[in-house]
Image (spheres, rainbow, N blue to C red):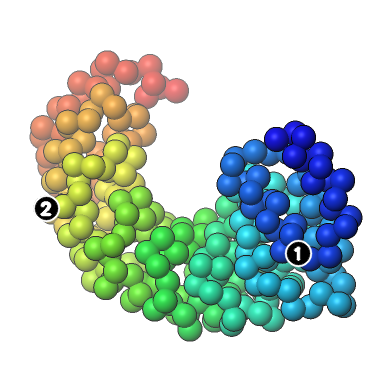
């Protein structure tokens, strides 16, 4: 990859399109390869192209892919993300649902809150919310919670779009959405009850963190869905020695918050705590 990166750096100055730069950065991010000199060179070239008066209507996917690539690699390049935001805003109504969700996810993953972009993105996403795929809905909800953005019309649109598609959500997406809404204190009981149904069906596939985050979210939202909470408790007992102390603490807290007493779970947590008391003390 070093040889490929060196060759790419040599040819960057010959590129006259953001798409070419986006393709290179996307490929390295997809492979999980962080080559800092190459990525910073791409950022410099991209900023120059984005600020050019001759480059005012380049491909929208290139903007989203570049933001996604840098964010996926954990590179918070402020000037680049500012340029991407400024160039994206006039075109957001023409962004696809995937480009919209990838853009908001990218800014959230590196915790960059660009308020004008978020306002414009909200309007565009609300208009296209029915087109969002399950992963896009979950990722967008997660992004809003990560940036601590309270936008009620946006949240309502995401919830409404998610309701008829919950059966198609992957387990991680279900957990991410319910956790994100709870973190934002967005209480939507119909959505929570609807999320409970597929969660119950898949509870055996939930790992310890899924159980913990789901229990915490329902308790934080004050939604006492007894069948789901009991199922989480039973599943946590089966996985008790695979649970981290924080997972067990979250589940116990959720049970107490909801006023539910599950003695077998408490006994299992007590046994696990005695076995791992040093971890709880850290």
* Residue 111 x/y as whole percent: 62, 54
Q: Name the residue rendered at 34%, 29% in the picture.
A: 245
Q: Quick one: 144 or 202, which is closer to the camera?
A: 202
Q: Quick one: 250 or 192, which is closer to the camera?
A: 192
Is label 2 in contact with label 1 (beta carbons under 8 Å)?
A: no
Spatial CA distance of label 2 from label 1 is 52 Å
Q: Name the residue rendered at 72%, 64% in the picture.
A: 19
Q: Name the residue rendered at 85%, 50% in the picture.
A: 11
Q: Give the label on residue 62, or none.
A: none
Mark 1 or mark 2, which is nearer the start of the sequence? 1
Image quarter hosting the N terminus:
top right
The answer to whether residue 111 shows anywhere in this view is: no
Q: Is label 1 in a helix, a strand or a loop? A: helix
Image quarter hosting the C terminus:
top left
Mark 1: give few (<14), some (14-19) or many (20+) Cα within 10 Å.
Answer: many
The correct choice, above or below, for 271 with respect to 214 in the image is: above
The quarter of the displayed image where residue 188 is located: bottom left
Q: Name the residue rendered at 80%, 60% in the picture.
A: 46
Q: Quick one: 166 or 57, which is closer to the camera?
A: 57
The quarter of the displayed image where residue 184 is located: bottom left
* Residue 22 x/y as whole percent: 70, 58
The answer to whether residue 247 shows anywhere in this view is: yes
Left or right position of 241 against 126? left
The correct choice, above or below, for 219 with respect to 117 in the image is: above
Q: Which residue is mark 1?
A: 18
Q: Give the label on residue 227, or none.
A: 2
Q: Quick one: 79 or 73, which is closer to the camera?
A: 73
């Amino acid at each position: 990859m070093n040889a490929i990166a060196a060759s790419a750096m040599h040819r960057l100055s010959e590129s006259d399109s953001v798409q070419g730069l986006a393709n290179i950065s996307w490929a390295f991010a997809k492979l999980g390869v962080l080559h800092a000199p190459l990525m910073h060179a791409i950022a410099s070239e991209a900023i120059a192209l984005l600020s050019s008066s001759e480059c005012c209507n380049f491909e929208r996917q290139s903007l989203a892919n570049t933001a996604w690539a840098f964010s996926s690699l954990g590179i918070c390049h402020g000037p680049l993300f500012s340029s991407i935001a400024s160039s994206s805003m006039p075109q957001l109504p023409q962004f696809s649902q995937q480009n919209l969700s990838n853009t908001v996810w990218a800014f959230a993953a590196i915790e960059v809150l660009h308020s004008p972009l978020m306002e414009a993105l909200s309007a565009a996403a609300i208009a296209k919310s029915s087109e969002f795929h399950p992963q896009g809905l979950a990722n967008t909800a997660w992004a809003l919670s990560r940036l601590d953005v309270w936008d009620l019309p946006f949240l309502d649109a995401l919830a409404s779009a998610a309701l008829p598609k919950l059966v198609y959500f992957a387990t991680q997406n279900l957990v991410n959405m319910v956790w994100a809404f709870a973190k934002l204190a967005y209480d939507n009981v119909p959505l929570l009850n609807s999320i409970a149904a597929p969660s119950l069906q898949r509870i055996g596939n939930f790992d310890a963190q899924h159980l913990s985050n789901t229990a915490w979210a329902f308790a934080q939202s004050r939604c006492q869905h007894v069948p789901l909470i009991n199922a989480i408790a039973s599943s946590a007992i089966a996985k008790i020695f695979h649970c981290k102390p924080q997972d067990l603490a979250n589940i116990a807290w959720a049970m107490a918050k909801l006023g539910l007493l599950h003695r077998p779970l408490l006994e299992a947590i007590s046994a696990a705590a005695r076995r791992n008391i040093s971890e709880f003390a850290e």
